[in-house]
Amino acid sequence: MSEHSAGLRTEQLTVRYGGVVANSDISLTVEPGQVVGLIGPNGAGKTTFVDAVTGFTSCTGEVWLGDRRIDGLAPHRRREIGLTRTWQSGELFGNLTVAENILVAARPGGVAALGRDVFGRRASRDDRVVERALAAVGLADVGRTLARDLTLGQQKLVGVARALAGTCELLLLDEPAAGLDSHESLEFASRVRAIAEQGPGILLIDHDMSLVLGVCDVVYVLEFGRLIFSGPPDAARTDPAVVAAYLGVPMETADA
Ligand SMILES: Nc1ncnc2c1ncn2[C@@H]1O[C@H](COP(=O)(O)OP(=O)(O)OP(=O)(O)O)[C@@H](O)[C@H]1O
């Protein structure tokens, strides 16, 4: 992670898939150190937004990381300058250790590179990358554990550590807590908050409303590709448009 993280800003980001406007004029900001939620019903366009920001789908409009406009950059260049993400299908490689799972994502050459020079001069630098990434998610001692031997909650955190390894200015988490029980989800939320406090802004997509509304500083709500709300989580809980589009009924505040 960088000590001086850069925020994310999009201006009128629009994605069309044929006749479907999956994202329409989305202007959104994630400041360094902020946790920002992006919520909405299935098919609202949340993953499309992450794909567009990270360069995996094309868009019109503008994407900025700090003072650098990045919407013309290839996905791997955006990753190199610190725009990192998790994937909805972000399973770990069960037969690899946690450290190997992290290095596979963090290093050019992937699994092959691990075999080539695991005993070489890059090894100590790799150790530091793994150490820092695991410390950031509060899992200092699991580097040598096989990924399949972790609890689901630990696996989710290693998925986040994998995204944090190397340069991370801005972290996009796409349904990172799917499948966690309420206790694990609370633990996950505190880790997300702790990561943001170390510098990077975080964009969090999840359907667990206790998690999102509990941990985020700001939330944006999408419906049919359009933003229908942006503001503090407590205002989202009772906003009529958000309730009608997504929540169904107003939600109590976290401390109610
Ligand atoms: N590659 C694609 N080609 C064509 N249409 C797509 C593609 N990806 C997504 N869509 C469409 O774009 C819209 C937004 O989908 P998206 O997956 O971004 O929604 P989402 O909010 O992430 O949904 P979920 O909560 O189910 O993950 C949907 O109508 C979807 O069918």
Image (tube, rainbow, N blue to C red):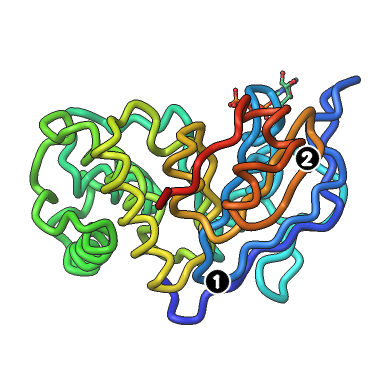
- Three-letter amino acid code at the position of disc 1: Pro
Residue 28: x percent and y percent? 73, 56
Q: Depth check: give the residue in front, 69 or 187.
A: 187
Decide: few, some or many residues near mark 2? Use Cα within 10 Å; few <14, some 14-19, many ≥20: some
What residue occupies the far front of the structure in this picture? Answer: 256
129 or 87, which is in the foreground?
87
Pointer 2: what residue? 58
Which residue is at a point 65% across and 42% down the rendered structure image? 238
Q: Is residue 44 left or right of residue 133?
A: right
Alpha carbons under labels 1 and 2: distance apart: 25 Å
The answer to whether residue 72 of the structure is visible from this angle is: no
Disc 1 within 8 angstroms of ligand 1 (CB): no
Q: Tell me residue 239's x, y (percent).
A: 70, 42
Residue 92 at least partly seen = yes
Say which label, 1 or 2, has the lower sequence index: 1
Q: Relative to residue 199, is residue 184 depicted above or below?
A: above
In this picture, residue 14 sits left or right of residue 229:
right
